[in-house]
Image (spheres, grey):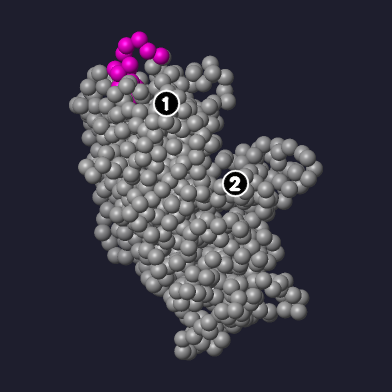
Amino acid sequence: MSLAKGILGGRCLAAQFGLPSGKKPPAETGKLPRTDGQTGSGDSGGNSIMFKKLHSGWKRFEEWANEDDSVSKSTTTQTSQTETGPSAPTQTSTKDHTSNHSDPVTEDTPKPEAYCYTNKSTSSSYKYTPLPSTTKSAIRVLTLLPGRADADIECRLIELDLNNPWTEDDGEEGFEALSYVWGDITETTPIQIDGATVQIGRNLRSALLHLRYHEKPRILWVDAACINQEDMDERNRQVMLMGDIYTKAARTLVWLGCPCCLLGALNTDRLTYSQGKWLDHLAGIDPLFEAIEILGNEARKLAEEGREVIPKQGEKDEDGTTYDRIKKLKPKWNIIFLENPWWTRIWTLQEIVLAKEARLCMERHELGWDLLRVAIPYYTALGFGDFSEIYAGSKTNSGVEPFNLVNAIREARQPGSELVTGDVGDELLHYLASSHWRDCKMPQDKIFGLMGLFSEGRDVGIEVDYRLDAEDVYRQATKSLLQQSGNLDALGFCYPYKIPRVTNLPSWIPDWGSVGNLALPLMNDAKGQPRTTHASRGLRSNPRWENNDTTLLLDGHIIDTIAKLGRMQVPPNQDDRNEGSLDHMLNDPVMIAEADSFPDRWEDLDPERPIRHFISAWWKGMRMAVPYVAKAILEIFGNVVEMRETFLQWDELVAAELSEPHEDRRTIFRDTITTATPCPLEPSVFDSRFEGWLQAVYSIRKLKKKRIDRYAPKTYTTLAAVTTFVKMEDDDLPEAFATYTTHTPRRRLGITASKRVCLLPKLTEVGDKVALLRGGRVPMILRPREDGSMQFVGEAYVHGVMDGEAFHEEECIDFRIT
């Protein structure tokens, strides 16, 4: 778990690491002791006395901070609140632009929140009536009956034909489709549908409570209620209709939850979400939505008038500048982005991409998607940052990246675009690549959840059938990709995950359900643009299958053999959680429980000695956190150093193997680690940045010569990291050299028997074959098996053969890949 996700609600360091003191500290030890010893600047004896007095004083401070005493009343009160759950706030701001016509919460109004309420009245379970078999476009919609905040949720289900337009006689402009996260389906709560009981997830209940009108019904399409989840045939048919449902809905309501429900959706059951933190998160919603409205409306105004943004200022009125107003609001974007699970699910992608109009709903606030779309770049243009940082060539903390990807897909799907008119296989791969990190409960849904994105007449060749296991679905999807695209780009997603989602797959079938980081596929260059070169001279592939579609046959020929290998390049962020690391601390139940009970409001402190209570709690928390923080710093430094050491070893390997007169080896090394990605800068400027980056790598060599890494590894790690940071170029530059090395993590450098320099899959072994396969944009690494078939290892960059220089169609033979 990342630091941003670990520190819930943006807690301060003290709140995250602090521990409750659980005592009333005695007053007589409330001051640090004086140190009255006389010292002189050149008197070693005086310095010794000073040191002893300081040490003695520090020990007394530690004893004072760690004294045991009775539990304070304030701490007892807070613990009681924690155990019984968060209580409702006294009031919630409801502004016209964010209100959904619900009443404000007061002391007399129960909190409409799924974790506290269930229907008071229940009855026998609801029995679904089968949908008409005479039409394939029949669906059900949910009529959410009006009610006050504390009333039971009551609904009706009605049938509707998607091919028959919604008329004015129906009394509504149409139905609204709900997009939400199911959350933990093992924890359900009842609602009433047509007088009978239906069990739904708590996050959905929260959505219905907040979206319900007081005076009139609301017509919604909600998958959990409108589809009979027990009827497999109906599920299959309705999933195929979801594209039409979200396309024909009057609008899509994106339910981002309310703060108290998000933890349930994230499955962090061990967390105690205390009243103070719940209120803090809740209080952040109103200023965030207000800031988005200001930014969005002003961005639209400037666009209409054709005026430029004034950085650090914006528009100006009697209340000051826009920049000052937003700065005062302090919008917490992580509330709707980094800490919100809606962005991480596969089903929500097609639901938002297909929406005519989308509204983001959170707690009692609503916001137009298009307003957010113009507000974010305007926020950046004002000078508040771009939500991401460049770390060793990779983006980190890219909070709005999911939002940007959704908008990019919506733009790419414009009528007549290449995406929706070209090969349907390329369209499917585009969606799979854009949603690789999105998760789902059933591995089949990683494919089924994208089927609604294909317009009528574009048959992707995949059958939605939940009776099929994940292996069959992934085989079917990969076969469709290879058949309908005419290329082998899909093979670039074959990656050896440490914990695969689906096991026992043939080597040519990617594990589409895994969401872990993989080596960046080589179908695009390091900047994400389609590769302009083609290793098989632009020819289309000719895939065939044998043995019940488990063996793939491809045409190609072998050009070389792997002779030497460098070590694998580590990713910018460690994949594994290490014991004692910062990530481990942020997931430690003991640490989380102690941090939750930290007195984060003045009322929670001991009224007799509030300052001392706070200092004592903070001090104990820091003592517990220091080992973790120290380990985390070494992890960060060690990761940077390991990356640079790997680049240094690669450079030395190339220098050793290309020692004879040869083309400039530095150029070969540069092109290999950048996969020959074109740079818009002048060649001399790019070369200068490469030399600066290379000098930062070489700086480690001096420390190694002094053997500091052997005798003082921690000191070496710190010095090497600091030296690297000082010497390296400014990584914030858009064309910094490190941003061109994004293909290197999770790969290794290699040398072939013919002295070709390669960037290879991490599991490559000496003796593996370099093959050029018909339809492949890049060379492939194959490993011979004893039965004469080949194991697919992965894609490779091989210097000097990337644009068909070594491909000869007349030499092609059939390779059986299993």
The residue at 37%/45% (across/down) is 553
The residue at 77%/39% (across/down) is 307
State the image coordinates of residue 691 (x, y, percent, origin top left).
44, 18
Query: In this view, which residue lies farthest toward the top?
Result: 661
Q: Is residue 689 left or right of residue 52?
A: right
Q: Is residue 242 left or right of residue 771?
A: right
Place residue 354 in its image quadrant: bottom right
Q: Is residue 812 left or right of residue 238?
A: left
Q: Which residues are magenta?
A: 650-663
Residue 613 lies in the magenta stretch: no
Query: In this view, which residue lies farthest toward the left?
Result: 711
Residue 656 lies in the magenta stretch: yes
Place residue 643 in its image quadrant: top left
Can residue 399 be spotted in the picture? no
In this view, the mark in front (2 or 1)? 1
Three-letter residue code for mark 2: Gly
The residue at 62%/60% (across/down) is 456
Residue 525 lies, with reference to residue 495, above or below; the image says: above
Residue 614 lies, with reference to residue 279, above or below; the image says: above
- Mark 1 neighbour class, 10 Å CA radius: few under 14, some 14 to 19, many 20 or more: some
Residue 422: numbered disc: 2
Q: Secondary structure at mark 2?
A: loop
Give the residue number, with chain letter if any, for mark 1: 806
Q: Secondary structure at mark 1?
A: loop
State the image coordinates of residue 644 (x, y, percent, origin top left).
35, 28
Q: Is residue 755 left or right of residue 462?
A: left
Of 170 and 489, the residue lying toward us: 489
